[in-house]
Amino acid sequence: MKKVVSIFTLVALVISCIGIVSFATKETEKNVDIVKDGQSIYSITYSGFWTNEDGSRLEPVEGLRDALVKATGADVRFYRSEDEINDKEIFIGNVSRSIFHTKKRVEAGGTYTVDADLIGIGGFVISSTDDRFILASATNIGAWNAVSYFVAECMGYDVLNAPAEPVSTLSVPASINIIKSDYLECNVQVVMDIAGTDISEYKIIYPANADNKTLESAKNVRRYIYAMTGIVLELVKDTTAASEHEIIVGNTNRYDVSSLSSDEYVNKIDNGNLILAGSADYSTNFAVEKFFNKYANVVSGVYTGNSVLSIDGNINTTEKMPFNETVIEGIDYSDFTRDNIAKLLGTQETPCYSDAKIADTIYESLKAGNPKSGETVFVVSNTAKYCTCDKCKGETKAFLETVNKVAEKFASENITVGVVAINETRKPAVSKMADNVRVYFAEPYICCAHAINDASCETNKAIASDLAAWTSVAKNVYVLDFTMNYYDYPSTFPNFDIIHPNVAYYSEVGVDGILMAWEKNSALLEFAELRCKLLEAVFANPTMSAEEYTTLKNTVIDSLYGYAAEAVKSYIEKFTAASTDHFNIFSSPADILPIAKDNTKTGAEAYELTLAKELANLWESIYKRHEAPKEGLFGLEMYEFNKNYVESDYYLPLHSRVQFTEWLDGNIPAADRHAVYSDIIASFNK
């Protein structure tokens, strides 16, 4: 889901152009004057939606007037939309809460009403009709965003870097149609059809008994289409009479998905209807996201297509999801790897798993916890101690056979038995695991510098072989992926390029689920938002090519970091190229990116700081314009300053800059840090 910060990225690009006070339009486009020869042509009209309880105007309304007055010196008039209607208005509000004079305004066209559920709390619409400009949003946050965008993009006026003298004439394009959504970033107005039928002819159908997740999937279809086209499709239950053109979401009475397994989905156009469905809520959600990614050019919450989108009428895809489950934002892996054998058996002694009574005892202990149908219980032996009797021989085979016996006892109850393949149990020692056993494959010492299937890395080569062996003997295998759970937090961790090949390998060998293992209380990983976006996209399409992954990475960086994107790309490229050949989650910052030292020299001269200076200068290029606020900022000026300071180009990579500092501190002894930092700072702007 697209966050509010995406709205600000475009604004930041414009307000960096200092001193521009008229909107740059194509020669064929018509402009209209908001202020001419120092006189206000347009008034600001606001609905009761934007008033406080005492009747005073909310800050976004005041902010727009302040910007116009500061830019031109003109006396800009205010009117309440409930009181009167004017010939030339800049209308701010949402007429769903403003009933007076609504009919006459709406008859003239334009978008006056927006729904937070459709566009998000930070979303807004700017439209025009005749002699009226409309800034519509559903929340105060959206109103601020709309005013900011209108001033910066449409007026071309930078409130933080205003000209010394007001301008006498200020114009904007006569025709404006801008939609900014929290759910999807789309920078063009799209004309869309499905199999030759205009998208406006469709209704979205969802199951009458839909759970919240399936209903949310149907809403996402509606949100994405609105963000792209500006068209609001009707969302109706499948109990209504069939209409001529429908987008069918989920397991409805319109299309039978009973033949699909829970991890299968269908994207299909049948008799003009678009079907996006799975038999389960998660497979339906995948069907929706996969359709927009594969057929509608949506990549990680960004529409990357052209202004015309025509959906082929021959779509007919029924496939399995790459993975039944993926957890992107990190799990506490200790819940899966904590040894519980002593607790289950009630003794600290090493058990003899060749004794059939052991399985009975474990089963009874697990039953005492009253597990319910569909749940998973765990039998975890994360130890180097195994019975050395003549039957067990100190091996893990008897333990795994015991797990099978426990699973067989639970089979009729629809309960899964989870076992972790780690340490001594990393290699499968049996020919087959019971169907209701789920194996959690875990290797904390995986090399994070190489892809798991990189044959040049002996460590990962052995790990990949063991994982493939497990998928051949177990029906259900999950991976606890430790490649981002670095122990030395915070530290720089340059391994973005292994995300795609690792997930592709998991898919290739038939892994059923991936859980990204990192501590929830240490979740601010280096460029964490970028990692999560890349994982989300690759989980959905693990077979993408290396070229597609590179394009994806660049698209996501551009979307997240705005004007700082090129610096972020360069930073990632430089520290990736300079990192050591092998490192894992326990490696120190100095092990990952060592800084050479010449012991014959002292102070900063003793260290090879070329890379450090290059990286520091990249951070300086991002942060140098973020100074402390000037005294007297208020209204739109303070909003713009705060937005520039904390949103996309500053706040998102902030923790990554902290990790850069930790890397330096990990290489430089405390006694030399002042000299080294002084030398690095002296390199700025050279």
Image (tube, helix red, strand yellow):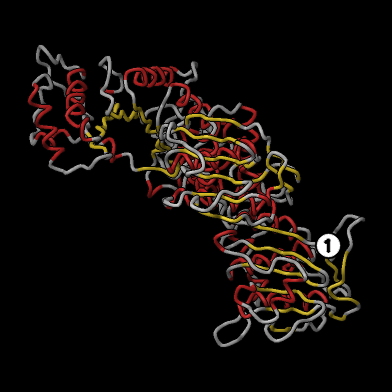
Q: Quadrant of residue 510?
A: top left
According to the picture, the residue beneath numbered tag 1 turns out to be 23
Vertical comparison of 287 with 507: above or below = below
Relative to residue 245, is residue 366 drawn left or right? left
Residue 207 spot, x, y in % from top left: 47, 49
Judging from the image, what secondary structure is the residue with disc 1 in?
loop
Q: Nearer the viewer, residue 676 or 627?
A: 627
- Residue 213: image location, x then y, percent: 44, 49
Q: Residues within 10 Å of mark 1 (few under 14, many from 20)?
A: some
Q: Is residue 441 above or below residue 49?
A: above
Residue 531 vertical placement versus 511 (above, below): below
Question: Residue at horizontal 36%, vertical 30%?
Answer: 478
Residue located at (66% from left, 54% from top): 9
The one nearer the camera, 591 or 95, is 95
Say whether residue 580 is visible. yes
Residue 531 on image: x %, y % = 52, 41
Q: Amino acid at mark 1?
A: Phe
The quarter of the picture where residue 40 lies is: bottom right
Q: Residue visible at 60% across and 76% down?
A: 97
In the image as oriented, which residue stretches furthest toward the top? Answer: 390
Name of the residue lying farthest toward the front: 241
User: Which residue occupies 22% across, 32% down?
Assistant: 380
Q: Which image quadrant for residue 129?
A: bottom right
Please provide percent x and percent y for residue 515. Answer: 39, 37
